[in-house]
Image: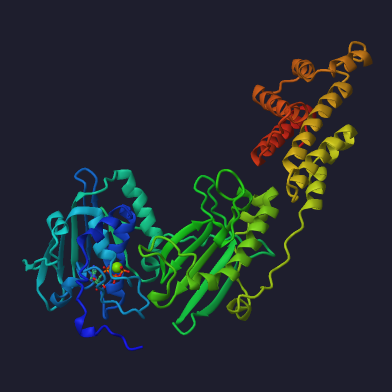
Amino acid sequence: MANSFSKREAITLDGTPDKRLYWSIISDYDIQTALCELIDNAIDQWMGSNPRAPLVVDLVLDADRQLISVKDNAGGVGQSDLRMLIAPGKSRNSPTAESIGIFGVGSKRAVVALAENVVIKTHRKGDKTYQIDVTSDWLESPDWDLPAYEIPNINEGETSIYLSALRQTFTTSYVEHLKQQLGETYGWFLEQKGCSMLVNGESVKALSFECWAYPPDFPPQQAFFNVDLSGSGTIRVDMTVGLIRDRNPATDNYGVYFYCNNRLVAKELKVREVGYFVSSEAGVPHPDASLCRAIVRLNGEAKLMPWNSSKSGINYSHPLFHAVRPVLLQLVAQFSSLSRRLKDDWEEKVFKHTEGQVQKVDSDLATQGKRLFLPPLPRVNKPHIEHLKAKNDLKIAEQPWTLGLVEAVAAVTILTRQKLETKNRIALILLDSNFEIALKEFVVHRGDLFPPKEYTDSKIKELFQRRPNVISEVSKKVAIPQNLLDKAKHYYELRNKLIHERATVGIIDSDVENYDRTIREILHILFDLDL
Ligand SMILES: Nc1ncnc2c1ncn2[C@@H]1O[C@H](COP(=O)(O)OP(=O)(O)OP(=O)(O)O)[C@@H](O)[C@H]1O
Ligand SMILES: [Mg+2]
């Protein structure tokens, strides 16, 4: 049927955006994210120009006066391009360039998010020097026109952005933190491209995360492959995964790190999407896996990158992330598991191995996301018992009654590695019984402290009717720190709740770990066992 409406009668809608569009982003940006947008632009401009003097980005953050300025010598903006600095969506970058900027919004959003007053001065070689003032009046007015006026020359090739009436305040200690973040984010440009960055006159040092350990059979694995995004373009992937030597338990500096076109976009990712499984209540994976780090470098057209629009995170539903994920998951699983299996002696088995070679995985398999050939992981269970017994062989020979105590300690460790839903409950019962038996063995076998004449069979039998009495007798003869006794008492009561109370109590991983450590320490005090 013919359309009865004619195009000629159509009304014209005004698609001019409203300034309100800025409101949404003010709350999205923190100072670091916003400053990085400005640095990204200087880097893009500089990388795309030829010939070029070394790039210098000079940041001043005055905590007393709450002022920020960012100056670069990347080339400046000419008159015909000045509107790129204020018109949302405008960009000079080609969508196929291997740049950082792509969306045409970074600088605009960043300056507005940072400050109510923004002054931009820029001088492109062969052009004049211009100034643009982005003020709250302009942001509040419906009009998009903004004057750019000529001012006395600043250095050729320079762009300076002055920010005042800041929307977020900062302290001097934040400035130190920022320096480190910039060193990490732009490490490659600082180190490989000779760029420099100054913060309040001090140079930012390049920081990298490639602090690998090379255990003899388990060096880091590197996968190089290309991802062809169904006709849109090809991205080069360079992924290295291995065990690290610079683990810092306070900062949880492990996980997956993503660089896009050499700029760090996300670090220390430990979520299910990248292969970490969070089961503990603290919301982070178990620390046993904490020596596994993955560094993923993606290079190619900016428009194909899986970053979010402020380049501060990864979009897990992006097709490029999906293409990289199968290889990433295999390698993260391999090294997380290795980290766990070697945890009884990270010092000897991991940290000591400071030198070696990164091993390359089969790039055809990686390209197709297939199963990689990775070295078989060391076995754990049997060696653990043998290791404990070997460490205590003399003690066990002298006091054969301690063999059962040592094996029970090993059994708890083995148990905690099993896929049993109620393993914590079994472990608690085992730990508590081991403690009780340990007390009995101590009383029965230390005739020097508990003379059989005084501690007759019937007295011992009576004594063992009540745990607190046994502990009090033992404590008279040997000093057990009160905190250990308190913990033992707490878990004894927890075990009793399992037996006597109507509702079943839940026992979490940290309870088992804590009681396990307590029992090992008490066994050391009572029998000089090294557990
Ligand atoms: N410091 C600078 N030196 C030279 N040109 C700049 C500078 N800052 C911005 N520009 C120009 O302004 C344009 C817009 O920058 P903006 O950050 O808004 O967008 P983008 O970098 O293209 O994309 P994205 O939103 O992904 O950052 C850039 O393409 C660049 O041409
Ligand atoms: Mg940009």
Residue farthest toward the bottom in the current orientation of the protein: 2
Quarter of the rendered image showing ligand 1: bottom left
Residue in view at x 43 percent, y 59 percent:
207
Left or right of 513 on screen, residue 474: right
Q: Assign the N terminus to one quadrant of the image.
A: bottom left
Q: Is residue 442 above or below residue 218?
A: above
The answer to which quarter of the image holds residue 64 is top left
Taking the image as drawn, is residue 358 in sight? Answer: no
Taking the image as drawn, is residue 114 in sight? Answer: yes
- Whole-percent x, y for residue 309 in the image: 36, 65
Q: Is residue 420 above or below residue 331?
A: above
- Whole-percent x, y for residue 174 in the image: 33, 47
The answer to which quarter of the image holds residue 508 is top right
Residue in view at x 83 percent, y 35 percent:
405
Left or right of 507 on screen, residue 276: left
Front in this rendered view, residue 330 or 74: 330
Left or right of 79 on screen, residue 318: right
- Whole-percent x, y for residue 69 in the image: 21, 56
Residue in view at x 59 percent, y 52 percent:
290
Residue in view at x 68 percent, y 63 percent:
216
* Tally of numbered discs: 0
Front in this rendered view, residue 376 or 219: 376
Q: Assign the C terminus to one quadrant of the image.
A: top right
